[in-house]
Amino acid sequence: MSEVLGASVSTILKAIASWLLARAIGWRYPEAKCRAKISIFASGGGPLFELRSSRSTPALIGLQIAVINSLPFEIDVEIRELEIRYNSQRLAATLNKHVRVAAPGVASVDLGEFNLSEAQRSELCQFGKGGAHLRTTICGTVKSGVRNFELRTDLEMKAMVNCDWKLLV
């Protein structure tokens, strides 16, 4: 009985100590300071519009981001929404991507593949080999033992276009 009681008291004391530590760190790291210490960049080889006729469905592939955490505590980033704009087109997706970033540390996440219509394939092939400029908005949540807040960030990147160039002549 006394062992169970001792274990319960120990568990409660550890929980209180963790809560007090999180509150103490939370006072030193208000939301604005936390936001300033988290950066999101495009990473990997870069996005690619894969539009060749040999592919059953044209798609945007290779869209990856890196999350840089300069905070003294670990964070979890949950990405819920993604919007990609290029020329007059808009691609939007609901995502369920999760990345845990060490304190301090860097982690990357692949945002997946986005299928395109035949009309979008045709329009993108007109860009030529120079590629397409993307404006990307990412929405999600940053969670930690210290603070949780909503995240919205805009990224600018260039996507290469892989087309059946012989069909354009």
Image (tube, rainbow, N blue to C red):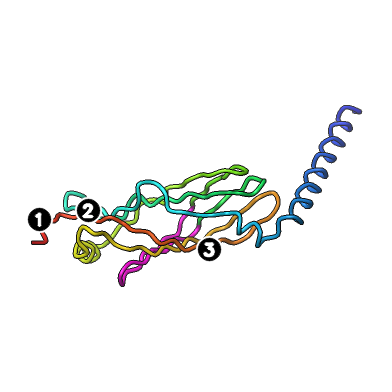
Q: Amino acid at mark 2?
A: Asn
Query: What percent of the width, then of the height, locates residue 49?
Result: 27, 55
Tag 3 or tag 1, which sits nearer the N-term? 3
- Residue on which disc 2 sits: 162
Q: Residue at x 74, y 55 (%)?
A: 28
Q: Residue at x 48, y 60 (%)?
A: 138
- Residue on which disc 3 sits: 152
Q: Locate residue 130: give its quadrant.
A: bottom left
Q: Residue at x 29, y 62 (%)?
A: 132
The answer to whether 14 appears left or right of 112 in the picture is right
Indicate the quadrant containing the N terminus: top left, top right, bottom left or bottom right: top right
Q: Which residues are magenta?
A: 80-96
The answer to whether 20 appears left or right of 68 in the picture is right
Q: Locate residue 169: give its quadrant.
A: bottom left
Which of the two residues, 31 or 149, is positioned nearer the viewer here?
31
The answer to whether 67 appears left or right of 117 in the picture is right
